[in-house]
Amino acid sequence: MPEASLCEKCGVREAFYIKRDSGEKLCKKCLYRSIERNIIRSLSRYSGLRREEKILYVDTFIPNIWDVSLLKIIIKISSNYKNQIYLLTFPWKQHFYKDLMDSIFQIIIDPVNYIMLCSEGFNDYISFITCFTKIRYLIGVEKALDMNIKKILIPCTRNDVFLKNIFSFIYSAKEMISETYPQRAFDEIIISNPIYNLITEDLIALSLTDVKDDLVLEKSLQQFFSSIDHRIKEFLSKFLNDEIIRELYTLGLSSREFMFSHPNLMSKYYSRYKRCRICSAPIDNEKHLCRYCLTLHSSFEKISKIFR
């Protein structure tokens, strides 16, 4: 980026980042506002959030550099509506949020027993990964039922939505597709994704806005973007040869058009299927539950009561 380049939004401050989806050059402040507005739109559209409601925010299993930055924005937005946030996180991540404890209630859940259920019930790799992905959703719903919370936020970037769709398509793992929906419902609970329209790179840039040294910042960004690109290629290399991967990149595998339209196409493809009553996954049986929820739901006391 040219040294004298100015933010295209405010025209005053020096540009810090070029947004991948729009190509806009933004300063740190305008990048923050852009992400904040995006999250507000998603909350308004998918969560149906009302004033003074309790929110259960379900953390990611794997640590991300943007975890704290994202939660800070969620807290700020929620405070405007006097919402109370309950953070459901995991033992290996609880220290991340020590500076936010005045603003949230933290709930620590050890998912090991649930993950063991996946390993015992599903031996093949594809089924285990799909089951593992659903555990986070089920833990969130169980805790929300226990605490009488009607709104759950389960963040998943557009990049991860895209990869889950690719996984679902190539492995014929149709149950995975429900983990990409921006909104689901169970009983009286609405489960939504507050970052459905945000890509990982934007959130990484947000988390690096406090870095003072430009050279350190540039190197950090290059490392993270390279890591993301490597993970996508590594994922695809499990079932595609190098020539096909290069062709996909040529066609725009990582482009805004492919990434943002693909999930909608997959949802339409599965629209003729019945839905699992717990996780909303497409099903083709008469049991009203997908095979994962059928296996797991009895281990969740509050959820299983609804199906007795």
Image (cartoon, rainbow, N blue to C red):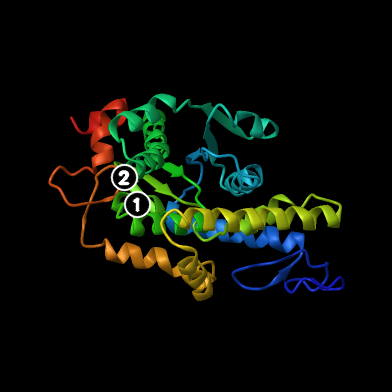
Nearer to the camera, 161 or 51: 161
Report the quarter where the N terminus lies.
bottom right
Q: In this figure, which residue is indicated by the disc labeled 2?
A: 279
Which comes sooner in the sequence, label 2 or label 1? 1
Measured in 3D between alpha carbons, the distance from the residue under mark 2 to the one under mark 1, in whole angstroms, is: 7 Å
Residue 237: percent from left, percent from top: 47, 56
Q: Residue at x 54, y 37 (%)?
A: 84
Q: Amino acid at mark 2?
A: Cys
Residue 219, compared with residue 52, is above or below; it is below
User: Image quarter for residue 103?
Assistant: top right
Q: Quadrant of residue 272?
A: bottom left
The quarter of the picture where the C terminus appears is top left
Give the residue at x 33% y 47%: 185
Question: What's the mark number on residue 178?
Answer: 1
Mark 2 secondary-structure assignment: loop
Question: Does dot 1 land on a helix, a strand or a loop?
Answer: helix
